[in-house]
Amino acid sequence: MIGEVLLLAGTRPEAVKIAPVAMAMADCAALCPVIVNSGQHAGMVQQALRPFGLRPDVELAFDRRTGSQAELVAAVLPALDELIVQRRPAAVLVHGDTSTTLAGALAAFWRQVPVVHLEAGLRSGDLAAPYPEEGSRQMVARIAALHLAPTKAAALALRAEAVPSDRIVVTGNTVVDAVQHIARVDQPAIDPALSAVEHRVDTLGARLMLVTAHRRESWGEPLNRVLHAVRDVVERHPDLVVLLPVHPNPAVGAQVRTVLGDHPRVTVTGPLDYPDLVRALRFADLVLTDSGGIQEEAPSFGTPVLVLRDVTERREALDAGCAWLVGTEPSRIVAEAERVLASGLRVALDRNPYGDGRSAGRVVHELVRLLSPGRHHALIAS
C-alpha cells in the first residue's frame, strides 16, 4: 500500500465532490481514503456524505464567533497541521476554493506532503467575483503537486499561468459521478415541502422553477432585484411554481420572505438535503442560480440554467448552451426566463461539458501515478 490520502471537506459541495473519490479509492488496494471534516460548516459535511453511505473519519471542532475568514483559517490550519504530523499521509486532497481548501493546502505544503487539487483551474479572472474564492483557488494553484482539472478549458487556464503540463490532468468533474449515483438511488423526497411541490407538478401539471441565491456578492440589493424578478416571472405564468431553498443567514431569509413569502405558488424552504436538491433539479423546467455547483449539476438532467452573476468561472456550460449569464438586472432575468419557459427548452444530455460519470476512477488512477515511489519527492523538490 502507498498510504493514506486525506480528503478534506468543510462544506457540502466539497463533501459531495469528494464522495465519489472516496468510494473509488476504497476499491483501490494501494490507497486508503481518510475523510476529514474541517468543521467549516457544522453538520453539512455529515449530511452530504450520508446519502453515499460515507461518514467523516476525522472531525475537527472549534468555536466560531465572528464568522470571519481569518478566524476560520486560524482555527483550521493548526488543527490540520497537527493531523498531518500524526497521520503522515501520502497526500492531501483539497477541492475547489474554500477556506478549508486554502488552509489544507498550506498545512500540507509546509509539511512537504503533496497537495492534490481537485477541480483545479477554474478562473473568472476577477479577484472580486467570486470573492474570496477566486483568490483562494489561484493561491492553491501555486503550491499544488497535482492539478485535477474538470475540463480542457480549466487545464488551459493553468497552462496559461505556467503550471507544468505534466502536473495537469483533465479528469472531468466528480459532481457528475455524484449526481448520477444519487439519481440511480432515486429515493423519495425527504423535505415535505418538496413532496408538496412534486404533487403539484405530477398531478396538476404545474411547471417548476428552482431558485437559489447564496453568494455573498448577491446579498442585499442584488438579491432584492432577483427576488422581484422571480415574483414577476411567476405572476406571468399561472402554471408555474417556485421552490426557493434559502440561505441559513437570517438576514437573507428575512429578505426572501419579505418579497416572496406571501405568494401562494412560491415555496421557501431551508437548505435541501443533497438527494432532494438533485431531485428538484430533475423535476425543474428552469433553474435560476448563482451557485457554481448547480451550473455543473443541472446539465446532467437537461435542465436549463440562468446564472445570476455577472461573471462565471464555469464558462463551459455557457459555451455548450446549457446555461446563460443574466446577472441580477430584473428585466434581463425576466426576458431570459420568458424565452426558456415559452419555448419549453431542454438541454441535450450529450452537451454536458463536465464529464461522463467516471471522473473518480481517473482521479484515483492519477493519485496512484503521482505517489509511485520517487515521483512525489521530485515534485515537492522542484
Image: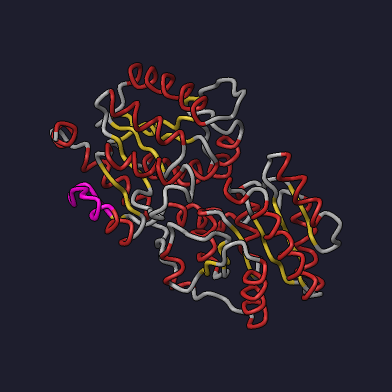
Rendered residue at 80%/58% (across/down): 196
Q: Nearer the viewer, residue 334 or 22?
A: 334
Residue 163 among those drawn in magenta = yes
What is the quadrant of residue 354 in the picture?
bottom left
Rendered residue at 76%/71% (across/down): 240
Pinpoint residue 30: horizontal percent, then vertical percent: 27, 36
Over which residues does the magenta segment extend?
A: 158-169
What is the quadrant of residue 5 in the picture?
top left
Name the outermost residue toward the bottom.
343
Q: Nearer the viewer, residue 188 or 295?
A: 295
Residue 266 shown left or right of residue 153 in the figure: right
Residue 310 shown left or right of residue 126 in the figure: right
Residue 170 shown left or right of residue 67 in the figure: left
Pinpoint residue 17: horizontal percent, then vertical percent: 46, 46
How many circles with numbers are drawn on the protein? 0
Task: Identify the image quadrant of the C terminus.
Answer: top left
Residue 155 shown left or right of residue 324 in the figure: left
Pinpoint residue 138: horizontal percent, then vertical percent: 34, 44
Q: Does 19 appear above or below 259?
A: above
Q: Does 162 appear above or below 4?
A: below
Pinpoint residue 8: horizontal percent, then vertical percent: 43, 34
